[in-house]
Image (cartoon, rainbow, N blue to C red):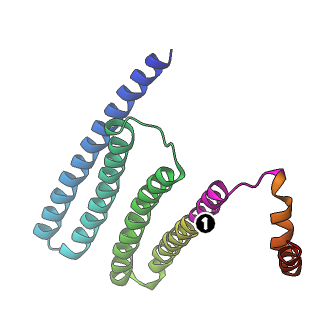
Amino acid sequence: MNAIYARLALVYFVTATIFLMALAGVLLITAVIKASAGVLSGDPVNALLDSIGIVIIGFAVVETAKFIAEEEIVRKRELRSSVESRRSITKFITIIVIAASLEALVMVFKANTEGLSQAIYPAILLTAAMFALIALGSYQWFSSHIEHDGERRETAPQLDESDDSIRASERNPARRSGSRQSR
């Protein structure tokens, strides 16, 4: 049963990756056509800004397809450690943050040509992207500290019950010196 599931999952991931790359290609062609039409019609700034926005969305789609291909098709593995999961989450959130930031930047330029009232949505989008970046940094910091604490606990020397005198002398230096004098 696991073999059937693995095969179906692989087929799905390959199909999804190919489909996403094809969609990104269509977006790129659309951006080129839109930019060319805008330049020829006499409204190059808006057409180019729209084309840049479309290319940015295509970039996010390509990066998502690449992420799926790397994680699910090429490596064919599950996330077995916290380091691997942290890397994967970092890649994925970074794709989102970059795409949202670039889209917000394009929208700011468009708002500059259309009026200040149009700047609210780009500002909210940029703020959301920055919060996502802060959340990613927090996740990285907390998960690395948890991982290091876990490693310290695993590598710490384990004392057995016969070492009670060692524990007592570690807690009480006077007792340690007294025990040496009595020997």
Q: Nearer the viewer, residue 38 or 183?
A: 183
Q: Amino acid at mark 1?
A: His
Q: Position of residue 146 (x, y in %)?
A: 63, 61
Residue at the farthest top position? 1
Q: Nearer the viewer, residue 32 or 85?
A: 85
Query: How many dots with numbers?
Result: 1
Q: What kind of secondary structure does the magenta stretch mostly adopt?
A: helix
Q: Which residues are magenta?
A: 142-161
Few, some or many residues within 10 Å of mark 1 (<14, 14–19, 20+): few
Q: Position of residue 122 (x, y in %)?
A: 45, 74
Please name the residue that numbered disc 1 is placed on.
Answer: 145
Residue 132's place in the image compared with 161, above or below, is below
Residue 52's image quarter?
bottom left
Q: Position of residue 85 (x, y in %)?
A: 50, 51
Residue 26's place in the image compared with 105, above or below, is above
Residue 116's place in the image compared with 170, above or below, is below
